[in-house]
Amino acid sequence: MSLPISVVIPHVQSRKDFLRRFCLPSVEANKPAEILVEPNSGGGTGAHWRNVGASKATQPFLFFCDDDIILAVDCLEKLLHALVWAPQGVRYCYCDLMSISLPGGHQFGDQPVAICKGAEWTPHDVRRGSVCSSMILIERDAFPGFDGTLEQLDDWDLCLTLLERGARGLRVPEVLLYAFYLDQGVSNRRNIVKSVHAVQRKHGMKPGA
C-alpha cells in the first residue's frame, strides 16, 4: 500500500548515475504514491525546481528529497506517522541525517562522515538559524513555496515563513537520511554571510539577532 506522499526531487545532470542507482530506488522502496523528478534543464535554483514539482503534486503530503540522498527504508513511514499524530499546529516534520563525503565532495565540518542532527523546533531556535534542511515532510496545503530568489538558506527562510503563518515543526530524532556529498555543491561556493543578511532583511530581523 502506498503512502499519500508526493516526493519531489530536483535533479542536476552530473548526479544522474547516483539518482538512478541509489536515490530513486531508496525512494521507491518507501512506497510514496507519487515521485516527481525535476531536471534542472533551464537554470534556476534548487528552490525553483522544488516549487515546480510541488505545483504538480497530487498527494496531501509533500517530501522534498535531494538527488544525492539515500532514504532509510522506513523514512517516509516514520515521518508520516510523526506528523499525523503530532500536536495541533504542527504542519511539517524533519529528521537527522548522516553525511558521507566522497572524494571531490565537500565535508560537513572537518569529518568525512558525520551525524547532522536537526535542532528541536522552537520559535527561538527558528529565528536563530535553520533547524533543518530542505528535506522535510509537510502538509501540501501548508506549503508556502521556497523563495527561489535566495542564493541559499531557502530552508531557513521556509521555516521562518511557516513560523510567521503559525505553523510549527517537529523533529524526529533519528537518522533516516544519508547524504552523499558527491561534489562541492552550489551553496558551498556562495557567501554565507550575505545570504544570512538577505534572509534577516526579508523577515525584518536585525543582523546578528
Image: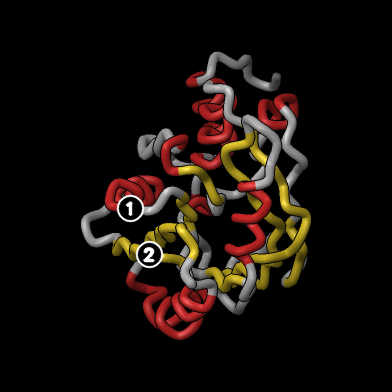
Which residue sits at x=74%, y=71%?
A: 113
Residue sitting farthest toward the bottom: 21
Quarter occupied by residue 79: bottom right
Is mark 2 in CB contact (under 8 Å) with mark 1? yes
Write down the residue under mark 2. Answer: 34
Which residue sits at x=73%, y=57%?
A: 116
Write down the residue under mark 1. Answer: 58
Residue sitting farthest toward the left: 42
User: Dot 2: what SS?
Assistant: strand
- Crowding near pointer 2: few (<14 within 10 Å), some, many (20+)? some
Which residue sits at x=68%, y=42%?
A: 86
* Side (left or right) of 139 relative to 170: left
Looking at the figure, which quarter contains the C terminus? top right
Q: Nearer the viewer, residue 52 or 42?
A: 52
Residue type, mark 1 in image: Thr
**Residue 151 pos. (x, y %):** 43, 41
* Side (left or right) of 126 relative to 185: right
Q: Earlier in the sequence, mark 2 or mark 1?
A: 2
Q: Is residue 165 above or below residue 186?
A: above
**Residue 6 pos. (x, y %):** 41, 58
**Residue 127 pos. (x, y %):** 67, 26
| Colouring style | secondary structure
Q: Nearer the viewer, residue 207 or 191?
A: 207
Residue type, mark 2 in image: Glu
What distance separates the C-alpha of mark 2 from that of mark 1? 8 Å
Quarter occupied by residue 8: bottom left
**Residue 89 pos. (x, y %):** 62, 30
Q: Is residue 66 above or below residue 129?
A: below
